[in-house]
Amino acid sequence: MSEPSRDSPTCLLFSKTLLAVFVLSLAVWTPQTSESQRTDPLIFSSIMVPDFTIGATLPSVAPADGTSLATSTIIVNPIEHFTGNITLSDLPPPADLECTPIVPATISNSSRRATLSCSSILAGTYAVTIIGTSGRISHNATAIFRFTAPPGFTITASSSVSFASGQTATSDVKVDPENGFSSQVELAATVSPSTGLSVSLNPFSLANGSGTSTATFRSFTQGNYTVTITATSGASRHTTTVNVHVAAVSHAPPAPSTTSGPDPVIFYGIFGGIIILVVAGTFLVLRRIRRSRS
């Protein structure tokens, strides 16, 4: 059997195959003697691992009344055909912020959403860290909650009032709105001790959460009283205190007469002169009577 010719198709195919394998081997791996001599390979490979992302929406601003809730939506998005369940939790919230548990605490690839609701009694901005875990995969998100001071009102009045028994005294009771408050406010007064002093308020109702009422105090019994004036509007309730002192009626000595009269020396001099004239006149009359008889 004769040897194949070097120019035959079989030899050419075999030679090209060996050359291709040699070049490919050099491209994939080349011995290195130092870091600076490293040659990047010509062949790359990329493997994508299933994963997920987590985020939280910014809720609307809520009043800081301790009951109104601000709710943030937690959104989970799968990556590269992620299909596992994700357990959600949150780190302890800051002081003055109270949060309900995340609902639901575990979400699947189909739901992708959960909610976290919080309330506060103090206006401000708060951040809560949310953790999503699935096996060895864990990601964090931050939910921001903002609370503003709730609408309300204040009430003020004179701290103390004094008057005499049998008299009256007044004090202005002022109601001022805050943060857009505009509801009607009802006023009422209580006295301690409960007897001896009467209090009336005019008016006893203020529209639009603003205005001034006059408190009138009457008493015929001396002593010290504490008057508590309460302003109420729905669930909002505020008070102010007025200390009332009722003094005893003082009996002052009668005022001196303002009628003008003669000087005492002149008065008594005239009075003495009149007496002398009367005595002298009487003597003369009696003398004449005696002479006429004789």
Image: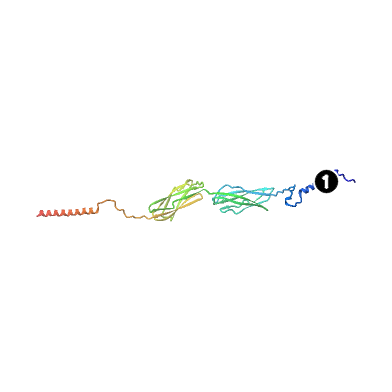
Q: Residue furthest right?
A: 1
Residue shown at the point (83%, 46%) measured from the top left: 15
Describe the element under mark 1 as helix, strand or loop: helix
In the image shown, does 125 or 26 lie closer to the viewer? 26
Q: Does residue 108 appear to the left or right of 245 in the view shown? A: right
Residue 2 occupies which quadrant of the picture?
top right
Q: Is residue 48 left or right of residue 146?
A: right
Colour scheme of the rendered structure = rainbow
Left or right: 142 in relation to 2: left
**Residue closer to the observer: 44 or 57:** 44
Residue 217 spot, x, y in % from top left: 41, 51
- Measured as percent of width and height from the top left, residue 115 is found at 61, 49
From the viewer's perspective, tell me whether residue 256 is left or right of residue 188.
left
Q: Position of residue 197 (x, y in %)?
A: 41, 54
- Tell me the kind of residue under disc 1: Ser
Q: Total label count? A: 1
State the image coordinates of residue 219 (x, y, percent, origin top left).
40, 53
State the residue position of label 1: 15
Q: Work out whether residue 5 or residue 237 is closer to the camera in this orientation and state it.
A: 5
Mark 1: give few (<14), some (14-19) or many (20+) Cα within 10 Å. few
Quadrant placement of the C terminus? bottom left
